[in-house]
């Protein structure tokens, strides 16, 4: 199998039409926009699980009073206390500080947020996250979240210990951009320096990135989940989580099968990096099923992700 | 993280069924829209072979190719296993790698004239421009433990190009695998018993639905098998005694006929406790699955008639893939 392990960039590649530039003045203003209060009020951008058609279309007057007989996942269940998505004591520690939160204005949705990871590149300014954290959905109805999009590495309780890095370029896979396929729900951003003029890679470093590897890996899943029992205020980690298999449903989507790992994540963890071999990004959190909160699904990093990396790594 | 409830949109399917107009309307032909299961240029190969007690068919679904093995157990029951792999289906070829199950690499040679596309062909929300011909190449498949094997290099078939009618006036007319003698359901919600289980890469659902006239039983599974996703469905129609369910939905018994075997009993206590016990199992092509015992969770409740109709219509077509959207406990509303 073709395998590529990239720890440094492979050379400049011209940006193509799958990305969008953020005007420099707007990007600079984004740093000031995100006050601690605004960061704390941002909500995960996630598509709410559609209600069961039965319940929506035919409400029963006695439904609320009746005993709930479906025990397993009748409703989006909250992870039990003691979830395996454990809190990181110090998210500013080396390597861990590469993970952080992206904040952005999501139009009518309000203030949105996701998780993301700094990735090593020659421009020292690349962030990887989920496709739906930079572009709302595929096709004509989708739109870019380019307003006030910033990456805050090492975020903790409203603090930004390494500053905020506003996006100057947002990019995603062609599959996510055109069709919104879950199988290619991956995106990247090129960010401007922080308030102190430091480039992202100089401030926090960057994970390596690999694509084209075997799906069967052992992952460290990073993220900032917001949904209960989490609060999104500190980084969490599912450590050494093995590949469980593919999501069978992903056979129908364009692109490779999605990967499943056992990690009780909730909204806000989208885009959180899955690293292997210590510090090499190999997937990001994309979605889960309401009735199976213990499983996290992420996109397989294949050739399309490789092309995405080469595009953003070449942008200065 | 985004939370999904259904991969193929049971909601959308139900909405589509509900929105089907009954009056005749002028029709035009347009390409199917991007998204869902149809691409802009959607071609669907149709190959059908008989192998002993099984029918083996090949079709396409979105970016995937499905090889389906169907067994008919009696006049009112059937079971099907669909092996779905990433692949390509165009107007000229079908290709998919089914890993340890086999491979399809066929080139299509048309033998008939190209179809004429006219508005009169619109009898459903989709219509097909069908081209008859011969597929030449490799169609090799071997089911689990060799329960069915196919190895052919030339087979008759056809390729349909799906076109969406801008306006439509009748339902989908695909011929069912078995004929359902019951009339479409009325407006009343239908009581059901269900047992369900889901993991990261697999799911199993059993539903027993009590119609006014007769019960029907559906079992569905989906599982990841490496490069292949395997979807299975089984359906049996009853005559009445196969499903007993009290009015309070606190006690019931299901004993469907072939392809099911055994029986299961359900009981619920006032404290919300419940039990689902017995020997109930189902025989799919290539797999036997128990339908009782841990880790299956049980439920009793009522389904609206549209959901019941969706369940029945897809089950009778052996359409395990469309039914996979029902492998979601949240879609079965507890009482």
Image (cartoon, coloured by chain):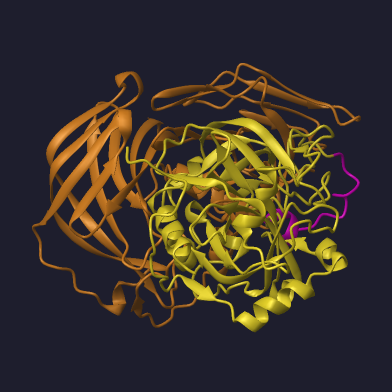
| Magenta run includes residue A2 | no
Give the side of residue B163 with respect to residue B196, left or right: left
- Quadrant occupied by the N terminus of chain A: top left
Looking at the image, which residue is at 39% across and 70% down? Answer: A14
Residue B173, quarter of picture: bottom left
Q: Which residues are magenta?
A: A52-67
Q: Position of residue A151 (x, y in %)?
A: 68, 62
Q: A218 or B12: nearer the eye?
A: A218
Shade representing chain B: orange
Q: Position of residue B259 (x, y in %)?
A: 47, 26
Q: Position of residue A308 (x, y in %)?
A: 44, 59
Looking at the image, which residue is at 74% across and 37% down? Answer: A85
Residue A260, quarter of picture: top right
Shade representing chain A: yellow
Looking at the image, which residue is at 49% across and 47% down? Answer: A209
Vertical position of residue A171 compared to residue A289: above or below: below
Q: Position of residue A202 (x, y in %)?
A: 62, 56
Give the side of residue B177 with respect to residue A122, left or right: left
Q: A271 or A140: nearer the eye?
A: A271
| Dominant secondary structure (helix, strand or loop) of the stretch shown in magenta | loop
Q: B50 or A261: nearer the eye?
A: A261
Vertical position of residue B44 compared to residue A241: above or below: below
Give the side of residue A144 with respect to residue A81, left or right: left
């Amino acid at each position: 199998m073709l395998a590529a392990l990239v720890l440094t960039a492979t050379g400049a590649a011209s940006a193509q039409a799958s990305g969008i530039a953020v005007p420099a003045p707007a990007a600079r203003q984004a740093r000031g926009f995100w006050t601690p209060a605004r960061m704390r009020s941002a909500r995960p951008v996630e598509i709410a699980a559609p209600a069961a058609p039965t319940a929506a279309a035919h409400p029963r007057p006695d439904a609320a009073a009746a005993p709930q007989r479906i025990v397993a996942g009748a409703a989006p269940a909250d992870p039990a206390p003691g979830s395996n998505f454990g809190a990181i004591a110090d998210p500013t520690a080396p390597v861990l500080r590469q993970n952080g939160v992206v904040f952005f204005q999501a139009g009518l949705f309000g203030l949105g947020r996701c998780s993301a990871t700094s990735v090593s590149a020659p421009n020292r300014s690349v962030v990887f996250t989920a496709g739906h954290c930079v572009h709302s959905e595929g096709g004509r109805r989708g739109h870019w979240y380019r307003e006030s999009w910033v990456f805050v590495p090492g975020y903790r309780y409203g603090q930004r210990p390494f500053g905020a890095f506003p996006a100057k370029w947002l990019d995603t896979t062609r599959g996510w951009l055109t069709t919104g396929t879950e199988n290619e729900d991956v995106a990247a951003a090129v960010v401007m320096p922080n308030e102190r003029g430091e480039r992202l890679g100089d401030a926090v470093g960057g994970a390596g990135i690999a694509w084209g590897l075997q799906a069967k890996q052992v992952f460290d899943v990073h993220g900032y989940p917001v949904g209960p029992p989490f609060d999104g205020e500190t980084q969490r980690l599912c450590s050494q989580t093995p590949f469980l298999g593919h999501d069978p449903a992903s056979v129908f989507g364009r692109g490779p099968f999605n990967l499943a790992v056992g990690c009780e994540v909730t909204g806000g963890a989208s885009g959180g990096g899955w690293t292997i071999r210590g510090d090499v990004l190999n997937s990001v959190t994309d979605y889960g099923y309401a009735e199976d909160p213990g499983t996290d699904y992420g996109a397989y990093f294949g050739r399309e992700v490789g092309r995405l990396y080469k595009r953003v790594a070449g942008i200065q | 993280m985004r939370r999904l409830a259904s991969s193929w949109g049971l909601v959308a399917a139900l909405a589509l069924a509900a929105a089907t107009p009954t009056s005749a309307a002028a029709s035009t032909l347009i390409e199917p829209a991007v998204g869902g299961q149809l691409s802009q240029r959607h071609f669907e190969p149709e190959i059908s072979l008989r192998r002993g007690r099984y029918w083996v068919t090949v079709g396409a679904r979105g970016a995937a190719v499905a090889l389906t093995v169907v067994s008919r157990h009696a006049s009112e029951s059937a079971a099907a296993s669909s092996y779905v792999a990433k692949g390509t289906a165009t107007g000229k070829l079908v290709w998919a790698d089914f890993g340890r199950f086999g491979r399809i690499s066929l080139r299509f040679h048309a033998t008939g004239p190209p179809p004429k596309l006219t508005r009169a062909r619109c009898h459903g929300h989709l219509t097909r421009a069908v081209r008859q011909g011969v597929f030449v190449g490799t169609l090799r498949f071997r089911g689990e433990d060799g329960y069915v094997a196919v190895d052919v290099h030339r087979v008759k078939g056809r390729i349909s190009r799906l076109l969406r009618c801008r306006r439509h006036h009748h339902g989908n007319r695909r011929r069912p695998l078995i004929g359902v003698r019951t009339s479409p359901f009325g407006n009343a919600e239908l009581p059901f018993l269900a047992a369900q289980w889901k993991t990261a890469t697999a799911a199993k659902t059993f539903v027993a639905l009590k119609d006014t006239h007769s019960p029907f039983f559906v079992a569905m599974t989906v599982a990841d098998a490496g490069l292949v996703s395997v979807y299975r469905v089984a359906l049996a129609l009853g005559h009445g005694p196969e499903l007993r369910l009290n009015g309070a939905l606190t006690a019931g018994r299901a004993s469907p006929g072939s392809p099911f075997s055994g029986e299961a009993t359900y009981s619920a206590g006032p404290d919300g406790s419940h039990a689902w016990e017995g020997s109930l199992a189902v025989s799919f092509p290539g797999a036997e699955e128990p339908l009782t015992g841990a880790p299956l969770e049980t439920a009793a409740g009522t389904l609206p008639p549209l959901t019941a109709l969706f369940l029945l219509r897809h089950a009778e077509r052996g359409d395990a893939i469309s039914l996979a959207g029902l492998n979601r406990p949240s879609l079965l509303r507890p009482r």
